[in-house]
Image (cartoon, rainbow, N blue to C red):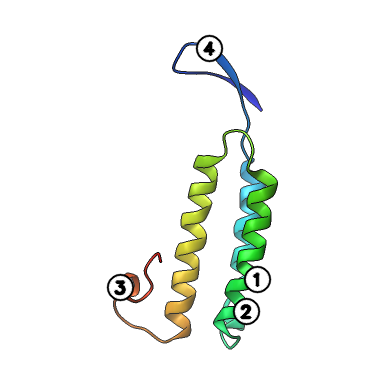
Amino acid sequence: MSRRLSRKGRYYPHVEPSAKSCGKLRGIVRDLLNVRIRNQPTGEVVAHLNRVTQGWARAFHYGNSTAKLGGLHRYVRGTLRRWLWRKHGRTLAQYEHYTNQ
């Protein structure tokens, strides 16, 4: 927690997840989407990944965590996209086949 100056010129307590805790979540996602589990059904892997990320977001969604959570959301989405792309043996159009939806 730190004190920061707002646009209106007042100080406010700035609270966000630490870099260490964000790194732990990235490590968990990396472990969940490794090469050894490509033979498992996609639905099970995605459901487990959703449980982990939603639990982490509930624990850290306080204060001013929007920017950090947005960055982690992009990381998880990109990692999952690459995992699916490699699982299904695609060679072209990674973002065309696996869109953000």
Residue 33, can we see it? no
Given residues 51 and 37, the one toward you in this image is: 51
Asked if the residue under mark 1 is in contact with the one under mark 2, i.e. CB atoms within 8 Å, the reply is: yes
Q: Mark 4 points at which residue?
A: 10
Of the numbered discs 4 and 2, the one sitting upstream in the chain is: 4
Q: Residue furthest top?
A: 9
Q: Which amino acid does label 3 sit on?
A: Glu
Asked if the residue under mark 1 is in contact with the one under mark 3, i.e. CB atoms within 8 Å, the reply is: no
Query: Relative to residue 22, is residue 5 depicted above or below?
Result: above
Q: Residue 73: percent from the left, percent from the top?
A: 50, 55
Q: Distance between the residues labelled 2 and 1?
A: 6 Å
- Residue 48 - label: 1
Q: How far apart are marks 3 and 1 (CA)?
A: 25 Å
**Is residue 99 toward the left or the right of residue 33 in the image?**
left
Label 2 crowd bin: few (<14), some (14–19), many (20+), radius 10 Å? few
**Is residue 82 toward the left or the right of residue 26 in the image?**
left
The residue shown at (41%, 87%) is 89
Of the numbered discs 2 and 3, the one sitting upstream in the chain is: 2
